[in-house]
Image: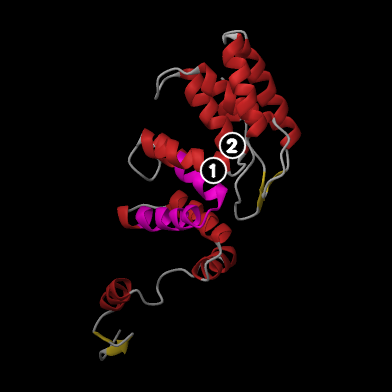
Amino acid sequence: MIARSRRTCGLPLRTVFGVLLALGFAGCSTAPPQPPIEHALAVSAEQGNPRAQVDLGIRMLAQAHTPEERATAVKWIRSAADANLALGQARLGWMYLTGKGVPQDTSRALKWLRLAANRGAPAAQLQLAQIYATGTLVPLDKAQAYYWYSVAAKPARSDVTIFNIVQVRFFAQMRAQSLADSLTAAQKQSVGEQVAAWAPAASVPYSAAVSLKNLMR
């Protein structure tokens, strides 16, 4: 039994329940400590590391239960995208495309996916190709789809290191070939010239693997 009031975190508390409520509202030590990896990511993100920012944002978004938590998670991913990390731009584009964590917005999705794709992110290149090939969110444009599949299949030096790049290029090449017969000779020549001239813009360097599971349709 508590015989007298105590002070915790600077708040007068008269009952056990009062202690717990006050600590909860004051943001004191009742909250469980961050796991070591999340603490390390948070420290690095606060120091301006774009890769830590996007990783932290993705983790936070997966665990978010309130609009405020989702907004904080999106803020970190957007910070990485604004810092020209192609991975962050690709993730933000996917979020706007699917409405995950942000309102669905095709025009914003295309903006961020193009930025990532032009920085050499194959995931964004394949996503753009699929968008134009299916014509579900934008008008069907097989020439644009052929272009982005061809770019994804093109060997190129970039700041993006993809562990399964051989698999990604093979997949992209197969998809490009499947579209080739639906284009005119003039379209194929024009796209071929654009692909030959394409070179990735600078990105914050990162390494990753590309999941093709959601693109197998």
Which kind of residue does numbered mark 1 sit on? Ala
- Residue bearing mark 1: 116
Magenta span has 9?
no
Report if residue 216 is visible in the image: no
Q: Residue at x 32, y 41 (%)?
A: 103
Residue 45 in percent (x, y) is at 52, 65
- Residue bearing mark 2: 123
Q: Earlier in the sequence, mark 2 or mark 1?
A: 1
Q: Residue at x 63, y 31 (%)?
A: 151
The one nearer the camera, 7 or 131, is 131
Which kind of residue does numbered mark 2 sit on? Ala
Contact, mark 2 vs mark 1 (Cβ under 8 Å): yes
Q: Residue at x 40, y 19 (%)?
A: 139
The part of the chain drawn in magenta is 69-93
Image quadrant in which you'd find residue 123: top right
Vertical position of residue 131 compared to residue 207: above or below: above
Residue 116 in percent (x, y) is at 54, 43
Q: Residue 4 vs residue 34: left or right?
A: left
Q: Which numbered disc covers residue 90?
A: none
The one nearer the camera, 52 or 13, is 52
Q: Residues within 10 Å of mark 1 (few under 14, many from 20)?
A: many
Q: Residues within 10 Å of mark 2 (few under 14, many from 20)?
A: many
